[in-house]
């Protein structure tokens, strides 16, 4: 029981440290458009990394199929997340347009 408490306390400290080290994307001065644009650029970066990893593997330069698969999955998951965010934004916009003034 005591070991579990120590593990939980250690993980909370690690989590707090990680959060404090990361910069908040929605910090002061960043508009929603800038945050969205940065996120789309990051998704595109993951896609480009996956493409280059596949090309390297196909040409024989990349010998590690695991890293290639990880890059592909990163790109896929980030794209799916972007699509879900887009769907939520469209849904919110449609809801606002349905409001009566």
Image (spheres, rainbow, N blue to C red):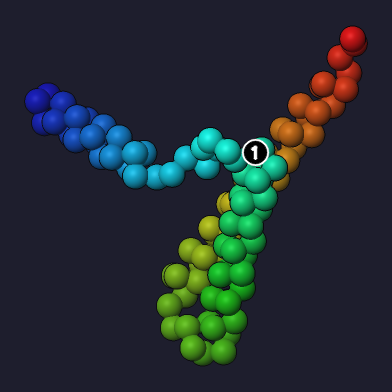
* Residue sitting at x 58%, y 52%: 77
In the rendering, at what x and y percent does residue 54 appear?
58, 77
In the rendering, at what x and y percent does residue 75 appear?
59, 59
**Residue 86 as seen in the image, left or right of residue 8:** right
* Residue sitting at x 59%, y 56%: 42
The residue at the far bottom in this view is 60
Q: Is residue 12 visible?
A: yes
Q: Quadrant of the C terminus?
A: top right
Q: Nearer the viewer, residue 87 or 57?
A: 87
**Residue 1 as seen in the image, left or right of residue 47:** left
Mark 1 neighbour class, 10 Å CA radius: few under 14, some 14 to 19, many 20 or more = few
How many numbered badges does the structure rendering display? 1
Task: Kindly identify which residue carries mark 1.
Answer: 31
Quadrant of residue 100 within the rendered picture = top right
The residue at the far front in this view is 29
Quadrant of residue 76 within the rendered picture = bottom right
* Residue sitting at x 51%, y 37%: 27
**Above or below 70: residue 78:** above
* Residue sitting at x 54%, y 83%: 56
Q: Quadrant of the N terminus?
A: top left
Q: Secondary structure at mark 1?
A: loop
Q: Nearer the viewer, residue 93 or 67?
A: 93
**Residue 21 as seen in the image, left or right of residue 30:** left
In the rendering, at what x and y percent does residue 83 appear?
70, 45
The residue at the far top in this view is 101
Q: Is residue 76 visible?
A: no
Quadrant of residue 4 within the rendered picture = top left
């Amino acid at each position: 029981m005591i070991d579990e408490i120590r593990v939980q306390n250690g993980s909370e400290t690690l989590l707090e440290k990680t959060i404090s080290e990361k910069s908040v994307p929605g910090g002061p001065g960043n508009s929603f458009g800038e945050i969205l644009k940065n996120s789309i650029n990051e998704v595109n970066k993951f896609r480009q990394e996956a493409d280059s990893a596949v090309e390297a593997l196909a040409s024989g330069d990349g010998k590690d199929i695991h890293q290639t698969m990880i890059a592909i999955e990163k790109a896929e998951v980030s794209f799916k997340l972007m699509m879900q965010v887009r769907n939520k934004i469209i849904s919110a916009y449609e809801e606002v347009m349905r409001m009566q003034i």
